Amino acid sequence: MALTDATKPTDVSLNTDLYELTMAQGFWESGLVDAEGCFNVFFREAPFGGGYAVACGMGQIADLVENFVFDDDSIAYLASVQAPSGGPMFKKGFLDYLRDFRMRVSVWAVPEGDLVFPREPMVRVEGPLIDCQLLETALLNLVNFQTLVATKTARVVHAAEGHPVSDFGLRRAQGPDGGLAVARASYIGGASSTSNVLAGKIYGIPVFGTHAHSWVMAFPTELDAFRAFAKSSPKNCVLLLDTYDVHRGIKNAITVAKEMEQAGERLAAIRIDSGDLAKLSKETRAAFDAAGLDYVKISVSNDLDEYTIQSLFAQGAPIDSFGVGTKLATCDPQPSLGGVYKLSATRSSADEPWDPVLKLSEMAYKRTIPGIQHITRFYDEAGCPVGDMIVDDSVRSADGDTNMVDVLDELMTYDMGGYESRELMEQVVEKGERSKEPDTIEQAKARCREAVMRLDPAVRRFLNPQIYPVGLEPGLAKLRSDLTRAERRDSARH
Amino acid sequence: MALTDATKPTDVSLNTDLYELTMAQGFWESGLVDAEGCFNVFFREAPFGGGYAVACGMGQIADLVENFVFDDDSIAYLASVQAPSGGPMFKKGFLDYLRDFRMRVSVWAVPEGDLVFPREPMVRVEGPLIDCQLLETALLNLVNFQTLVATKTARVVHAAEGHPVSDFGLRRAQGPDGGLAVARASYIGGASSTSNVLAGKIYGIPVFGTHAHSWVMAFPTELDAFRAFAKSSPKNCVLLLDTYDVHRGIKNAITVAKEMEQAGERLAAIRIDSGDLAKLSKETRAAFDAAGLDYVKISVSNDLDEYTIQSLFAQGAPIDSFGVGTKLATCDPQPSLGGVYKLSATRSSADEPWDPVLKLSEMAYKRTIPGIQHITRFYDEAGCPVGDMIVDDSVRSADGDTNMVDVLDELMTYDMGGYESRELMEQVVEKGERSKEPDTIEQAKARCREAVMRLDPAVRRFLNPQIYPVGLEPGLAKLRSDLTRAERRDSARH
C-alpha cells in the first residue's frame, strides 16, 4: 500500500517510541538484563462519558509477541541513529543483544469482547523489564484504539435497537491499518458488516455496500442510473435517493422496483444520505407502502452516531439499517481511550518474589495500583455482573474479607459476599509463546453481545450512567495505602 | 505487524469500500468501460474552526496509482463474496477484467505542504469512471487524515513560537499505519521530530525520546535511576521529574547534572509530564538557574495542544520544547477532515468534450462545483496570498473579467485584477504513471513553513479567523448557476 509498501511484518519491533529502546539499552547497560517488571494496561475513565468499555485487540497480542524480532534492516537503521549531541545513539553491544532478541514475557488479558471498567487491568504483562518496555508502544497501539472503536460500536448498536449497523468508516480512518482496525473492532462491538473489502478478505467479516451519488451523475438521468444498477446488481440492489431530489428519487426507485418485479427480482432497499432523515424516511416508507413495495427496506447514512440514531427512533423514523462511518472510525467526540501502561511490581530476577511499586501524582486520581493484579468479577443469580474486585493473591487478606474497597474512594466499600464469581483475565502468552489459540472474532462478537445485554441498564445508558463498582480486595487496598504513606514520608524527608 | 502481517502491497486495491467494486462492475456491464469522469477531493470547512488547511498525503498518490493491481488472492476473495440474496456478488467476466486492470487515471494535486481552503479541489482525478471509482476510497484514506494532522501540527507549531515540537502520538494512533501517517504529516506540518522509530527508518524523520516513569520505578531510588540513565545516555540525557514528586525530582536531577559536569558531560534537558506545567516549569527553571545549570532545557508533555501551549506562554512558562501526543495523533477535538470526492464532469470517451455535472442537496452549502477545475492563487506585492480562484478553462469568460464570485455567496465578488498569480495544482500522475518525482518531505515541510508564515495573521489565528477569499472565475460561476437552475427545473417537472 502507499503507506505500507515500505514496511514488513518484522518492522513491528520498530513500531515503537524511541524511549523504549533507549530505556532497554539503559537496563542492558545497568546490568538489569534479568530484572523483571509487571505492567498493566488500563484507562482512567470510560470513553464517551459512558459506564463501560469493550475490551478489544487482545486476540492479536500473541501475534505481536511472537513476531517481535529485529532484522538486519532494523539493526542497520538503529546503528545509524545519532544522539542529539553527537555520536551513535545505540552501542554496538546492545545492537548485538537486540539481534538475538526474542520476547520472554507472559501476558494475561481480559477476553476480547468482554466488558472492562476504569482502572482495572485490561492486559497484564510480566517479564524482563527490557521486554516489557519494548512491548509497550505496540501493545498500546493495538488495544487502545480497538477498545475505543468496539465501545463506540456497542453504543451505536444499542441505539439501533436490533437493526443492522454497517461500518462505512474506511475513508476517514488513519490509513489502511486504521481501516482494518475499525472494521475488526466494530464487528466485535456489534456491527453486522463493513464496507471495507480488505477487512472482508482478512477477517472474514461480511461486506456490504450500495452505490454513490457519482453513479447517478454518470448517467443521463437518474432513472437510467437506477435501471443500470438494478440490471448489474439485481441481488444486491440498494438505490441511493438523494443525488438531486429525494422525492424524484422515490418516484424513480418505485418505477425501477416495479420493473424488477416484472423480471422476477426484488429491490432490496433504498438509501438516504442527506437531509432530514426522520422526515424523508417516513415519506419514503409511505410512498413505497402505497406502491405495494412494503418489502423494500430503508437504509440511512450521513454523520450518524448513537445520539442521532436514538433521536431518529424517538421521532418514529421507519429505518431498517444504518451505515455509520466518520463518527465510528474516528470515535468522535472522543478519539482516544487514554489507555496507559504502568509498572506495578519489580523483582531482580524471575526467581525472586515481586516487590510492589506505585506511582504518585499531584492529582490523586492518577495514583496507580501496585501488585500482581487480576480481576474477580461477581455476578447475581441472573448472571448479570455486579462488581469487579482487583486482587493480588500475595497480599490477599487472610480472613477472607469480602468488603472490597472502592478504587477511588478508600472510605467506600462494597460487600461482595454471597455473589457468584469468576476470574476474568486469561493467559494468552507464556514466556514469549502463545498459550492458547485466540478466540475467533465471531466468539469475541458473541461474548460482547452477551456481556452488553447482561449489563445493568443504568450502567449502559448514555446520559449520566451509574458507576459500575470496581474495588480493591482488602489486602491490596492496605498494600496501596501503606505504600502511598511510605512514599509520601520519603518524599517529605528529601 | 500484528495488524499488517496478513497484508501485502497489492492489497491496496482491496483497501476500498465494496460499493466502488460493485459500481465498477456496473459500469463494466453497462458498456461504460471507456466513459470518463472528473472527480475532485475537497472539504467544506477548515478543520478546528480555523481558517486554512495544510495539504498532505499528495506525495504518495503516484505510489497508490502505480501499485493498484488485483492479484490472484484478491480475485479469489472477490469470487467468494456472496450477494445478500444469494449467488456471487461479482461476475466472472468482470473478475477477468480486474485481473488485467491497470489504473489509467491522470491526477493533479495541490503541492504537499501548501495551504488549501474550503471547497477548492485538493486533488483532481480524470479518467475512466471505473478507475476513478476504484481509486476513491484509498485516495481519501490517504489524504483526508494526513491533511488533518498536518493542519493540527501547523497550529501547534504556531502556538509553540519557534520552540521544537515532537510527535509523541504513536500509542494513541490507529495501528502502525496510523502512527506512520501521524509522524509523516506532523513533520510536514512543522514538527521537529517524532518518537516513532519506524517513521524514522522509513521517512528519515529525526527521532526523539526521553525515558518513562517506569524507568524511575524500576530502580531502588529516583537518584539511582537518574544516575543510571545519565550513564547510559550521556549524549541524549533528558530526565523525567514527576514520577513521585517534582520538587524532589528537581533536586535529584541537579545532583546528577553536577555529576555529569564532573564527567565532562552535560544534562540536555528535564521533562515534566503532569501537574501545573506553568508553575512547575518556572520553579524548575529557577532551581536550575540558581544551581548554575542555565543550559539545561525544559521539555513538557501531557495532553498538550495549541491552546494549552498558548496558555503556558501567556503565563510566562519558560519552556523550551514540547512533546505532543494524543491530541495530535487523534486530531482532537475534530478527528475527521470530512474530505469528499465528487464528480464534476463526464464524457462518453477520452475523445469527447467534457460535460460538466453538479450535485444538488437540500442543504445549499452541499451543492457541488461543476467542471474541470484548477486553482489560480493570487498574491500581493509581499508574496502573501490574497485569494484563490477556481477556474474551468473551457468556460472562462472571454472578456477576462477578474471579479471572482464567492464560492458560497453568489452576490459577493472579489476583484483580483492587479494581483500577481500562479497556478496552484500540479500534475502528479499521467495516464496511470507518475509524471514527476514527488517532493521530498523536507521540501514539503519547507513549503508549509513558508506558506503558513506568509498567510494573513487574521486568517491564521485560532479564534474566529477571517475567511480567506475563495471564488469562482465568472464563467464557471455562470456555468454553475445555469446548471443549478436547469436541474431544479427538471426536478420540479418530475
Image: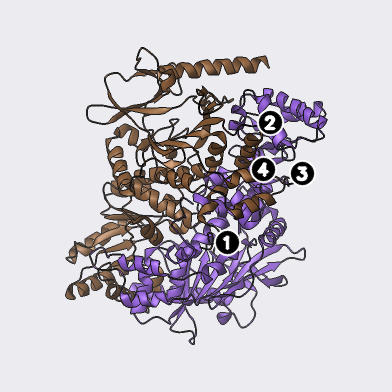
Chain colours: A purple, B brown
Task: Give the CA distance from mark 4 to mark 1.
Answer: 39 Å
Q: Residues under labels 3 and 2: Cα distance?
A: 19 Å
Q: Residues within 10 Å of mark 4 (few under 14, many from 20)?
A: few
Residue assigned mark 2: A228
Q: Residues within 10 Å of mark 1 (few under 14, many from 20)?
A: many
Q: Mark 3 points at which residue?
A: B85
Of tags 3 and 2, the one toward the viewer is 2
Q: Distance between the residues labelled 2 and 1?
A: 41 Å
Q: Name the residue under label 4.
A: B93
Mark 3 or mark 1, which is nearer to you?
3
Please report the residue visible at 27 percent of the width from the left and 38 percent of the height from the top.
B453
Q: Which of A261 and A441 is in front in this view?
A: A261
Q: Which quadrant of the figure contains the C terminus of chain A?
A: bottom left
Residue plotted at (42% across, 68% down): A360
Q: Do the residues labelled 4 and 1 touch (CB within 8 Å)?
A: no
Which chain is disc 4 placed on? Answer: B
Residue depth check, mark 3 versus mark 4: number of the one nearer the observer: 4
For disc 1, the marked residue is: A57
Q: Identify the amino acid type marked 3.
A: Ser
Using the image, name the chain to which the residue with label 1 belongs: A
Q: Residue A169, image x and y in percent?
A: 57, 45
Please tell me if label 3 and label 2 are on a single chain: no
Furthest residue in direction bottom, as rendered: A351
